[in-house]
Amino acid sequence: MEDTPLSEKSPSYQQGYARGRDEADMVELTDELKRQFLNGMQPDPPELEARSPLSGEWAGESLAETLAENFTEQDADDYEQGYLLGWEERLLQRSSD
């Protein structure tokens, strides 16, 4: 695992990370879902599967609107990596509470 502090990551990564954490806060976690997540099991409900912010199916906005009109492929990759880490870390944190 990479140990680079979040503050040293690209702005696109930081945006994705913040968005992933925010989206994870919207998931309703039952006790059973918390147990599944903490045990590393593949959760049954689709709302606990890490979503791709690049899919456009659920985000309500395009990646271009999220990052800026002149985003690069690297910006998109950074955003998605940050999003997925933020999503997973926040769900794990909420499951541990």
Image: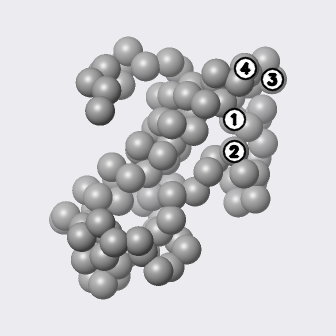
Q: Is residue 53 above or below residue 94?
A: above
**Pointer 4 local density, CA inside 10 Å: few below 14, some 14–19, many at least 20:** few
Amino acid type, callout 1: Thr
Label 1 near label 2: C-beta < 8 Å? Answer: no
Looking at the rendered image, the quarter that the C terminus falls into is bottom left
Q: Mark 1: which secondary structure?
A: helix
Q: Nearer the viewer, residue 32 or 62?
A: 32
Residue wearing tag 1: 66
Q: Which mark is residue 69?
A: 3
Q: Nearer the viewer, residue 17 or 81?
A: 81
Residue for point 35% across, 78% down: 33
Q: Quadrant of residue 5?
A: top left
Which one is earlier in the sequence, the residue at label 3 or at label 2?
2
Q: Mark 3: which secondary structure?
A: loop
In the rendered structure, the answer to whether residue 73 lies left or right of residue 83 reads right
Looking at the rendered image, the quarter that the N terminus falls into is top left
**Pointer 1 local density, CA inside 10 Å: few below 14, some 14–19, many at least 20:** some
Distance between the alpha carbons at the discs numbered 2 and 1: 10 Å
